[in-house]
Image (cartoon, grey):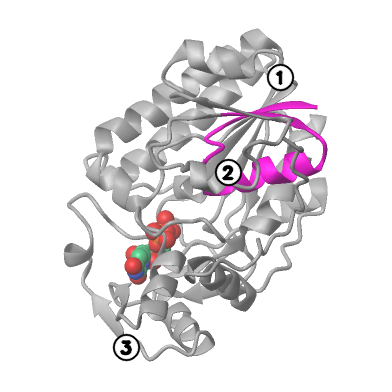
Amino acid sequence: MKTAITGGAGFIGSHLVEHLLAAGDTVTVLDDLSTGRLENLRTVIGHRDFHFVEGTILDRAAVDKVVAGADRVFHLAAAVGVNLIVEHPLESLRTNIHGTEVVLDAVLESGATLLLASTSEIYGKNTSDSLSEESDRILGSALKSRWTYAAAKGIDEAFAHAYWRQFGLPVAIVRLFNTVGPRQTGRYGMVVPRLVKQALAGEPLTVYGDGHQTRCFSYVGDIVPAITKISEEKSAYGNAYNLGGSYEISILTLAERIVELLGSGSPITLVPYEQAYAEGYEDMRRRVPNNGKAKDLVGFDPKTTLDQIILNVAADHRPVKAPDPLGWKVTMAAN
Ligand code: UDP
């Protein structure tokens, strides 16, 4: 199968590239390398079925180039990470709204199928203990940048759904809940790589607010195969699917677990939100997915434990890299 991936040099995108090459796909990536890195693609550069185009999803010609001839497209390119969103609200809005519209148009013309990566952010402040795809979205002020990200991704979903209803575009949506794993950088927010890095360096672990806010972390190695399977299901078109972890943990307990598991001597410090983030940040107290719909469709049942996730992220941060913990076993073409 011929597959195109926007944002394929990013954290999740690069794992998806490896997974699909190992399955025999020809893969073309479009990435502007703003947050993505070529280093993430080091295991596949030179592979005979891998192609890379540097460019932005705001550029229709670049999008057309990678989408041409593709059977399916994964749209992962986006401005992500709370730090990036609150510090660069305008670029984030443009990329996440206009960029997605460009991709939808290009895919519609090309005749490929599309999988749109969305986010649990769209549920906002809904603290339900089982967020389902039909759950209400509770967003804060439109003047706070954090909520403009949630709004933008909600509009992306609405655009995708309208393309499906009005033009029959075969598009499925996945909502990712705090996906973590090797290659994720803490530079743009993302608590697990940040705390792991701090623990390994013997620095204080920065827990924001009172630390009692909770999340359900999922492992990229569980998420990528599920995304792939969903992209292959005709009944997924016009639908959205939650993909998240099944274990809820507070950020304070997460920090304690990281310190213990990595044998770190680091202290844990509580940092007030106003010190931690630029203006425009507001936290979510809780975010718990109901994965039932993805389980029914593709048997989604995330197995990787939080301890294993932490150990894999730590292995990725140590100076001497361990072999790729996901082990997709991509065979390189002989050059
Ligand atoms: N967080 C923290 N310390 C950090 C980075 C983040 O305590 O160094 C908190 C953050 O305020 C939030 C949670 O960890 O409550 C998850 O943050 P992340 O940015 O990873 O994801 P999101 O907020 O999008 O769920």
Mark 1 or mark 2: whose residue is earlier in sequence: 2
Q: Residues within 10 Å of mark 2 (few under 14, many from 20)?
A: many
Residue located at (49% from left, 10% from top): 61
Residue 257 versus residue 312 in the image, above or below: below
- Is residue 291 visible in the rendered structure shown here? no
Figure quadrant, ligand 1: bottom left
| Towards the viewer: 134 or 200 | 200
Measure the C-alpha gap from mark 3 to mark 2: 35 Å
Magenta stretch: give its range: 1-29
- Residue 170 is situated, as x and y percent measured from the top left of the image, at 71, 22
Mark identifier at residue 70: 1
Residue positioned 62% across, 56% down in the render: 220
Q: Tell me the SS state at disc 1.
A: loop
**Residue 177 location, quadrant:** bottom right
Residue 101: x and y in percent read 48, 19
Give the residue type that dot 1 points to. Ala
Pointer 3 or 2: first along the chain: 2
* Callout 3 amino acid: Pro
244 horizontally vs 333: left or right:
left
Which dot marks residue 267?
3
Q: Which percent across, then down, holds residue 79?
A: 39, 39
Using the image as rendered, state which of residue 275 and residue 11 is in the foreground.
Answer: 11
Going by the numbered disc 2, the residue's amino acid type is: Leu
As drawn, 191 above or below 196 = above
Which residue matches tag 2?
41
Q: Distance between the residues labelled 1 and 3?
A: 50 Å
Estimate the x, y position of residue 28 in percent, counting from the top left.
64, 27
Residue 18 among those drawn in magenta: yes
